[in-house]
Image (tube, rainbow, N blue to C red):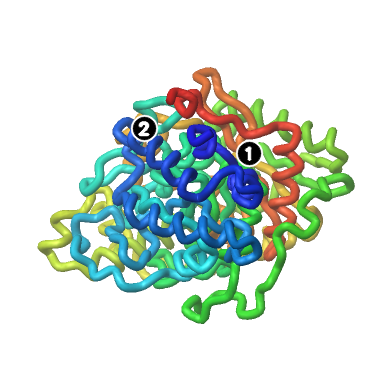
C-alpha cells in the first residue's frame, strides 16, 4: 500500500485518509522512500526535511482520526515548494551562491502560509536555476536536475525540481513559479499538469524581480488536484499589490461540466512562431488534441491572434533582461562573481538596452494584452502547443543551441506572461523518443476555473501517464 500512496493523486489519497485506510504518516514515509530511491538520479531537492514532514504528518493523522477536524481537502498530503518561494524554517537559496546559506528563514510567502494553514505536509524545497533566470534547471549551487522520462535530458525550468520530484512520487503535489513559462515548460517536458493562474490571483510575496510577469501555481498529476490546490492558495493576501482582495472562487464548482458548446480557437503557431521551429511530433500531437475537443462537443476553429507585427519574444526579452540587470546590480562585486555566467550576460544586455527600448516594450506589452483580450472575447478558450519541442539535453541553457539569454525558444508560454491570462499545460502525447508533449489551454482574465474544467474534460479521455521510472521501485 505505501508504495502506491506516493503515486496516488491527492484527491484519492485524502479519500483513504477519510476512510482510515491510509494515514498521512504512511504517505510521507512512502514519499521519503521514493526520495531515497530516485533523488540521487534526478537531483530534484535543494533541501529535504524528513523530521519536519513526519511531525506535520502525525499532527494531520490526529485530525483525520477525529473526523471533522481536518484543515482542508488536502490536509496531510505530501507537497514540495520551489526554492524561490519563501518558506519559514527552510532555506530559500534562489539557486544562488550569492545568497546567505544561514538565512534567516523567518517568513512564509502567502502560498507557503496557505499550505501550512491547510495542513499539507512539506517534504522540502525543490531545485531552481539561479533566480529562475532560465527555462531549465541547473545551478552552480545545486547542480543539474534530470528528467524522469529520460536521464540526461532536462526537466525544464525554472520549476524543474518540483516536476521531477512529483512525476516519480517524491511528493503528491508541487508549487512552482512562472515568469515566462516556468510552470508550463517543466510540466510539458515531464508530462504533468501545470497551471499559470491569472496574474495576481495567487498572491506573490516578496515582489518578484520580474514584476507582473511572475505568477505562482500548482503542478500536479491530475487536473482535479490542481483545482483543489487553487481553493487553498488562490486566496487574498495584502502583501501582494496586484492581488484580488475579494477573491473567493470555488474552483471545483462546475468542474465536471465538460466542454460541450464551448468555442475554442486552435492555433498551431499562435500567429507568429515559425512553423519550421515547431517539432513535427509536437504539431501532430496538438492537432490531434484539438480533434479530441471536437469529439467532446466543443466548437473548435483554427484561428490565431494578429499581433500587428509585434513579436512577443522581443517584448518579453526586453522586460526580462532589464529586470535581470536591476537584480544583478543589487549585489556586490564579490557576490556577482559567484553568479551564473548566463545570468551575468543577460544582465549586461539588459543594462545596455536603453530607455527607449524598455519603454517601447512596456507599451507593446499593453497592446498585445488588448489584442489577446479581444481575441478571447470571440472564444471561450485558446489551445496551442505548450512548447515547440520536447526535452533536450541536460546542462544546455536553451533549445536550438541558444545560450539562454534569449528566452524566445518558449514563445507559446511567454506570450501569456505578458498578457497575464490563465494558461495551463496538459500532456497530449509522446514524441518519437517517448518524451512528453504538452498542450496549452488559455482562458480570458479570471477564467481560471474554465481552463481547469476544459483540461479535466480532456484528461478524462486522455489520462496523464507516469514515467516508466516511477514504476521502478
In this image, 315 relative to 423: left or right?
Answer: left
Q: Residue at 43% x, 51% y: name it.
A: 80
Relative to 122, say whether 192 is above or below.
above
Q: Nearer the viewer, mark 1 or mark 2?
A: 2
Residues at circles 1 and 2 in contact by the CB criterion of under 8 Å: no
Q: Position of residue 386 (x, y in %)?
A: 58, 41
Relative to 341, say whether 91 is above or below.
below
Q: Is disc 1 surrounded by few (<14), some (14 to 19) or many (20+) residues within 10 Å?
A: many
Identify the residue at the far front of this view.
66
Question: Mark 2 highlights which residue?
Answer: 38
Q: Nearer the viewer, residue 136 or 201?
A: 201
Q: Residue at 52% x, 41% y: name it.
A: 187
In this image, 10 relative to 471: left or right?
Answer: right
Q: Nearer the viewer, residue 186 or 47?
A: 47
Q: How many numbered circles are shown?
A: 2
Q: Position of residue 78 (x, y in %)?
A: 48, 50
Specify the quadrant of the image occupied by residue 289: top right
Q: Position of residue 337 (x, y in %)?
A: 13, 56
Secondary-structure class at tag 2: helix
Question: Mark 1 highlights which residue?
Answer: 439
Query: Separation of disc 1 and disc 2 at Cα?
Result: 27 Å
Identify the residue at the far top of this view.
432
Q: Residue at 77% x, 40% y: name it.
A: 302
Q: Position of residue 162 (x, y in %)?
A: 43, 46
Q: Residue at 83% x, 50% y: name it.
A: 257
Specify the quadrant of the image occupied by residue 301: top right
Q: Is disc 2 surrounded by few (<14), some (14 to 19) or many (20+) residues within 10 Å?
A: many
Amino acid at each position: 500500500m505505501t508504495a502506491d500512496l506516493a503515486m496516488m493523486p491527492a484527491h484519492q489519497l485524502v479519500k483513504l485518509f477519510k476512510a482510515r485506510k491510509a494515514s498521512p504518516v504512511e504517505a510521507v514515509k512512502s514519499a521519503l522512500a521514493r526520495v531515497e530511491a530516485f533523488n540521487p538520479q534526478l537531483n530534484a531537492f535543494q533541501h529535504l526535511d524528513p523530521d519536519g514532514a513526519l511531525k506535520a504528518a502525525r499532527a494531520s493523522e490526529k485530525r483525520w482520526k477525529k473526523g471533522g477536524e481536518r484543515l482542508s481537502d488536502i490536509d496531510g498530503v505530501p507537497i514540495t515548494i520551489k526554492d524561490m518561494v519563501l518558506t519559514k524554517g527552510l532555506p530559500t537559496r534562489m539557486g544562488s551562491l550569492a545568497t546567505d546559506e544561514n538565512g534567516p528563514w523567518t517568513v512564509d510567502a502567502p502560498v507557503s502560509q496557505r499550505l501550512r494553514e491547510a495542513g499539507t505536509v512539506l517534504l522540502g524545497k525543490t531545485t531552481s536555476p539561479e533566480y529562475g533566470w532560465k527555462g531549465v534547471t541547473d545551478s552552480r549551487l545545486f547542480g543539474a536536475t534530470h528528467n524522469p522520462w529520460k536521464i540526461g535530458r532536462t526537466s525544464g525550468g525554472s520549476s524543474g525540481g518540483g516536476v521531477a520530484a512529483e512525476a516519480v512520487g517524491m511528493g503528491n503535489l508541487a508549487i512552482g513559479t512562472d515568469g515566462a513559462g516556468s510552470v508550463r515548460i517543466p510540466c510539458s517536458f515531464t508530462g504533468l499538469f501545470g497551471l499559470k493562474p491569472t496574474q495576481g490571483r495567487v498572491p506573490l510575496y516578496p515582489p518578484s524581480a520580474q514584476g507582473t510577469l511572475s505568477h505562482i501555481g500548482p503542478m500536479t498529476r491530475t487536473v482535479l488536484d490542481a483545482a483543489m490546490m487553487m481553493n487553498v492558495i488562490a486566496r487574498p493576501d495584502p502583501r501582494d499589490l496586484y492581488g484580488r482582495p475579494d477573491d473567493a472562487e470555488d474552483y471545483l464548482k462546475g468542474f465536471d461540466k465538460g466542454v460541450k458548446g464551448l468555442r475554442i480557437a486552435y492555433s498551431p503557431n499562435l500567429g507568429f512562431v515559425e512553423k519550421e521551429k515547431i517539432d513535427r511530433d509536437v504539431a501532430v500531437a496538438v492537432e490531434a488534441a484539438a480533434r479530441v475537443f471536437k469529439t467532446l462537443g466543443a466548437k473548435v476553429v483554427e484561428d490565431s491572434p494578429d499581433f500587428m507585427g509585434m513579436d512577443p519574444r522581443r517584448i518579453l526579452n526586453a522586460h526580462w533582461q532589464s529586470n535581470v540587470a536591476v537584480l544583478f546590480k543589487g549585489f556586490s562585486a564579490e557576490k556577482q562573481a559567484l553568479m551564473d555566467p548566463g545570468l551575468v550576460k543577460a544582465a549586461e544586455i539588459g543594462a545596455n538596452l536603453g530607455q527607449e527600448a524598455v519603454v517601447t516594450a512596456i507599451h507593446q506589452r499593453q497592446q498585445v494584452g488588448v489584442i489577446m483580450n479581444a481575441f478571447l472575447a470571440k472564444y471561450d478558450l485558446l489551445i496551442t502547443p505548450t512548447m515547440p519541442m520536447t526535452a533536450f539535453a541536460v546542462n544546455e541553457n536553451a533549445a536550438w543551441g541558444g545560450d539562454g539569454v534569449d528566452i524566445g525558444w518558449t514563445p507559446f508560454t511567454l506570450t501569456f506572461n505578458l498578457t497575464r491570462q490563465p494558461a495551463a499545460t496538459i500532456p497530449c502525447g509522446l514524441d518519437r523518443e517517448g518524451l512528453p508533449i504538452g498542450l496549452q489551454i488559455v482562458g480570458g482574465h479570471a477564467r481560471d476555473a474554465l481552463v481547469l474544467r476544459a483540461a479535466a474534460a480532456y484528461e478524462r479521455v486522455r489520462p496523464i501517464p507516469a514515467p516508466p521510472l516511477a514504476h521502478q521501485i
